[in-house]
Amino acid sequence: MEFLDWETCGRSHCYLDSLHPSSPTSGTCGLGRLSTYHVEANTADDISRTLDFIRKHGIRISIKNTGHDYFGRSSAANSLGIWTHNMKDTKYHKTFQPQGCKVQYENIGEIGAGIQAQEAWEFFEPLSMLVTVGAVGSVGIAGGFGQGGGHGPLGPTYGLMVDQAVEFDVVTADGQKRTINECTDPDLFWAMRGGGGGNYAVLISYKFQLHPAVPLNVHFFRAYWPKPVDITESKIHSDIISALASNQTVFSQNGIAGYNFILPDHMVSLHIMPSANATALKAVTEQYHDFLDSYPGIKLYNNSYHTFSKFSEWHEFTEQPCIAQNGPVGLGLSESGRFIPKSLFSTPADLSKLTSAVLTAMQFSYTNRGSGSAQLYSTGPANHLDGSATSAHPLWRDSLWEVIMGGGWTASTPASVRTQIQNTISASIQPFKALTPGGGCYVNEGDWMEENWQQTFFGSNYDRLLEVKKQYDPTGLFQCWKCVGWTGVRDPMYSCYGQSGREPMASIPLGPVG
């Protein structure tokens, strides 16, 4: 698994100390919450026969490609795991007509369920095509990413990964192999275009729109400063976050995606514009660039523009020094998230409230064993307002930021401290919830302890998604944590979640919101 949390069940685990990987494990090595057995699926027939066996014997299942999941949905103790990682078929269709449809598409990609982002762009890049992947090359893009939404550096320009989908090959709970699209099983196709992975059917192959390759133009900023005692009183944090928020509407309108990592003592940010016009990004961001360039009291390491002719070149430049450094793996991780709507970027008063919320959340995290960091992503479909063909949370279309608060721990961190970190990250999102009543977050990047999970993860789509779930999986063969149709924490399948030791924690003291 990507994170230690989801390999653990109470005291049963087999931790490798990520800080000292050559050290032997201490204690007894156990499976934790990993599946007892796995089927290494290579074909649709493998999966169909596995589902027949599962139904016959009443076995619980989990579905996994790479294990990139913040909720532990690709592992379950005492289950039979379906491992799709070796389903690597990849094809390019110059023209493509979905089964049973009259419409014909050009430049369609087809990938197996096990394909990872880097494998996808390495296949399609020589064909001069772009894939709407995320920023991390190891993520499997046909599973939770491609069925839960899928945001990334191309999001403002082309939309989410689910916006690109034209057809899926799947196996449903009854063991039937189906090809689904907007003409054949349209309800199931809609549900799997944003309603979450591993819950409606097992995906075999994913067919999606490719885009002609264009250069990626990047503004890269990195600076350090002294750690403040109180982030809410830090002029540096306040000024830089306010400047970013003030420019965000224009950035998004021009198709600029952003990854902003803000910590107590530094900030790293990337702004990306796919365009053949090498000067377009600079024209839009120059004022922000100049503000950062002349800001006093910070140690500036980078404030530069770059153009990459290939996506792979952009990835090589960014993932290790920027993305991976600010999102390490092999640790335990707690996360919470929130969509920030366009309306909060419209007036000075709203911008002030938003800046204050970021500072308050960071300070609370900072002083309560969290990392004190805030991730401000502008990688969603801000310019693709009609999401009716997909079941991704409708608030994606009305948001300019996805805010993520996070905190990590290692194998040697005491259980009591892990619990405090988890509680801190849950509480640190409260300033943003106060600003966005009735709001939500990305289903793949939220708090696994979210109480109002139906609204927060699925929004107004939940009831229809539940109807589709009942139609195609009436016995609830597919189950995962806080997915549509979730059976609740008392289900023995989720017993490992109850062993986290989490205790209630006082919420952040909030000032007036209005």
Image (cartoon, rainbow, N blue to C red):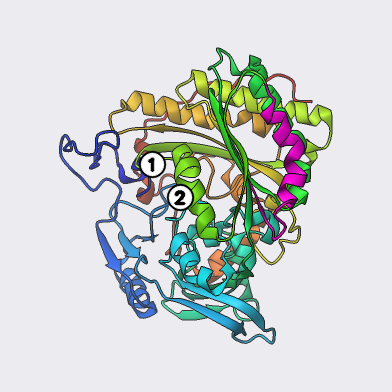
Q: Is residue 28 magenta?
A: no
Where residue 309 appears, as percent x and y from the top left, is: 59, 60
Q: Name the residue under label 2.
A: 481
Identified at 32% across, 61% down, the residue is 81
Separation of marks 2 and 1 at Cα, in angstroms: 9 Å
Q: Is residue 221 left or right of residue 250?
A: left
Mark 1 residue type: Tyr
* Residue 492 image point, x, y percent: 35, 49
- Quarter of the image where one finds residue 376: top right
> Of label 2 and label 1, which has the lower sequence position?
2
| Mark 2–mark 1 CB contact (< 8 Å) | yes
In the displayed structure, would residue 494 be above or below residue 358? below
Looking at the image, residue 421 lies above or below residue 385: above
Of 223 and 211, nearer the camera is 223
Disc 1 marks which residue? Answer: 497
In the rendered image, which quarter contains the C terminus?
A: top right
Q: Is residue 252 above or below residue 157?
A: above
Residue farthest to the top, as pictured: 229
Residue at 64% x, 80% y is 106
**Is residue 323 found left or right of 22 in the rendered image?**
right
